[in-house]
Amino acid sequence: MKKSGSTEDESASRLIDARIAALADWRGETLAKMRKLIQEADPDVVEEWKWVDTPVWSHDGIICTGESYKAKVKLTFAKGASLEDPARLFNSSLDGNVRRAIDIHEGDEVDADAFKALIRTAVALNTSVEKATARRAK
């Protein structure tokens, strides 16, 4: 995980650790597994804690959030509607104009390689938007 040098990043990581531990069931295990895959896909990912109790992974903008509910873990991709998803991982929020989500229920397996490819695609989109914005600002 990229460290910006602020205690905010470290605090977010600790809050995510605490959230995973507090879940203490398959949801915590799932969130931990998906977090690890995100970090493997993008070693420069920044962990944030937003909206009171939501883990957020960012790189030049939000990649995805990680919410946990009674019956699922939901990974919502901020710009999911703009991402190629050849493995068809997105299975929720499919009617939205911007976001897409992956709902993971107990016992579900997510294709790790396809998920990491999706993370890298989201990072590439964020990075291209960030670079285009910087060029226009000059």
Image (spheres, helix red, strand yellow):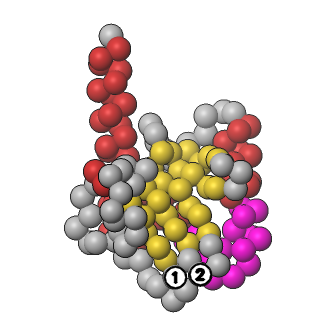
Q: Where is residue 30 shown, x and y percent of the image?
A: 57, 75
Query: Is residue 31 shown in magenta?
Result: yes
Q: Quick check: 113 left or right of 49?
A: left
Q: What's the residue at 69%, 82% (across, down)?
A: 25
Q: Is residue 121 visible?
A: no
The answer for how far apart the CA atoms under marks 1 and 2 are is: 6 Å
Q: Earlier in the sequence, mark 1 or mark 2?
A: 2
Point out residue 5 in the picture as x, y percentages from the top left corner. 66, 33
Q: Quadrant of the C terminus?
A: top left
Q: Mark 1 and 2 residues: CB-CB less than 8 Å, in contact?
A: yes
Q: Which residues are magenta?
A: 17-33
Q: Given the image, on which type of amino acid does mark 1 rest?
A: His
Q: Is residue 137 left or right of residue 35?
A: left
Q: How many numbered marks appear?
A: 2
Name the amino acid type tagged 2. Answer: Ala
Q: Position of residue 94 (x, y in %)?
A: 34, 65
Residue, disc 1: 105
Label 2 sits on residue = 71
Depicted 111 relative to depicted 80: above or below: below
- Residue 117 to residue 61: above or below: below
